[in-house]
Amino acid sequence: MFPHISKCALQLAKFMVTRDGAKTEPLEFKSAFTRMTNDVIATTAFGVETNAVKNPDEKFYKFAQALTDVNGLRSIIAIGFMMAPKLMKAVGLSFTPKYITAYFQDLIYGTMEHRQKMNLVRNLKLSFSSVNIYLKSIRKNK
């Protein structure tokens, strides 16, 4: 896992040095480190290579940002799920918007299928998709 995190850190360092105005304009550290953290999560948990540090319109970053944005109606829905989860489910509400859930499900299943077809194993000890592939292979062998 360390090599993947190290690669994300190198992407951030390279961006900090080579960006436009690197020597004259200040860098928004919160945004840069948020994007690097997103890249680390994408590569270690989902097995997807991203570079949100360099590309602010990175699809994974945008969906992760939308997932963690709990303002307005979503905050009311969150309170509803804490107070009456059965009622919220009965009404058919979901805390996570369906388009976000669909994106992450497609990403996970697509990564798993690609790895199975290509017989790829990523050098991660406990990535979510690696565990799922392992569990599926155990079920098939029983």
Image (cartoon, rainbow, N blue to C red):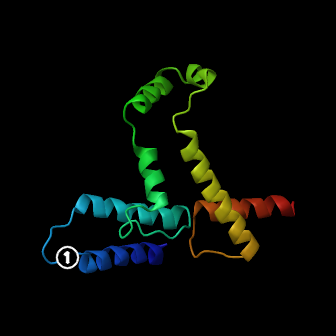
Q: Is residue 5 left or right of residue 107?
A: left
Give x and y (percent) for residue 1.
49, 72
State which quadrant residue 121 falls in. Answer: bottom right
Q: Residue at position x 47%, y 23% from top? A: 80
- The residue carrying pointer 1 sits among few (fewer than 14), some (14 to 19) or many (20 or more) residues within 10 Å by Cα, namely few
Give x and y (percent) for residue 55.
39, 67
Give x and y (percent) for residue 32.
29, 64
Q: Residue at position x 67%, y 61% from top? A: 110
Q: Is residue 93 above or below residue 106?
A: above
Q: Nearer the viewer, residue 30 or 122?
A: 30
Q: Residue at position x 23%, y 62% from top? A: 29
Q: Residue at position x 58%, y 51% from top? A: 103
Q: Is residue 51 above or below residue 85?
A: below
Q: Is residue 101 above or below residue 120?
A: above
Judging by the rendered image, the residue that carries numbered circle 1 is 22
Q: Nearer the viewer, residue 58 or 117?
A: 58
Give x and y (percent) for residue 96.
52, 39
Q: Which element carries disc 1, helix, strand or loop?
A: loop
Amino acid carrying label 1: it is Ala
Q: Residue furthest right?
A: 142
Q: How many marks?
A: 1
Query: Which quadrant does the C terminus fall into?
Result: bottom right
Q: Is residue 23 left or right of residue 14?
A: left
